């Protein structure tokens, strides 16, 4: 029985892409790397601990961002989507919004 459980767990990991090449986790470090080290751009989406900002905080920071910062965040999100970053639900929604506007 343990062998079956282990085999099932391993198959699930491969099926869900846990070992897929290039898959990154959505975190502050990954976002800063994709943003070319621009912490101010990542600050729009995340706090210093890598937690998603509240909707109101995100909106205020987006509205206050320069056009260049907004463009960089759009590019960062597009790269994350292309690289199949495993975004949080909030991060995925916001990246979809900024890349389609």
Image (tube, grey):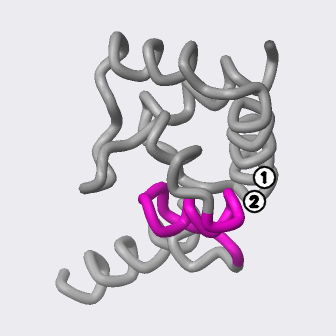
Is the C-beta separation of discs 2 and 1 under 8 Å?
Answer: yes
Magenta region, residue range: 22-37
Q: Nearer the viewer, residue 76 or 82?
A: 76
Which residue sits at x=30%, y=83%?
6
Residue at which label 2 appears: 83
In the figure, 10 relative to 27: above or below? Answer: below
Quadrant in the picture for residue 56: top left
Which residue sits at x=71%, y=65%?
36
**Mark 2: secondary structure:** loop
**Mark 1: secondary structure:** helix
Spot the residue most to the bottom.
3
The numbered disc on residue 88 is: none
Which circle, 2 or 1, is nearer the viewer? 1
Which residue sits at x=71%, y=30%?
70
In the figure, 79 relative to 44: above or below? Answer: below
Residue at which label 1 appears: 79
The span from disc 2 to disc 1 (Cα, nearest Å) is 6 Å
């Amino acid at each position: 029985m343990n062998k079956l459980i282990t085999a099932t767990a391993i198959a699930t990991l491969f099926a869900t892409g846990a070992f897929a090449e290039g898959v990154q986790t959505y975190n502050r470090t990954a976002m800063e790397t994709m943003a070319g080290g621009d912490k101010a751009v990542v600050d729009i989406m995340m706090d210093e601990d890598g937690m998603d900002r509240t909707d109101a905080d995100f909106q205020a920071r987006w509205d206050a961002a320069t056009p260049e910062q907004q463009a960089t965040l759009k590019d960062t999100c597009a790269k994350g989507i292309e690289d199949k970053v495993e975004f949080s639900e909030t991060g995925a929604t916001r990246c979809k919004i900024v890349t389609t506007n």
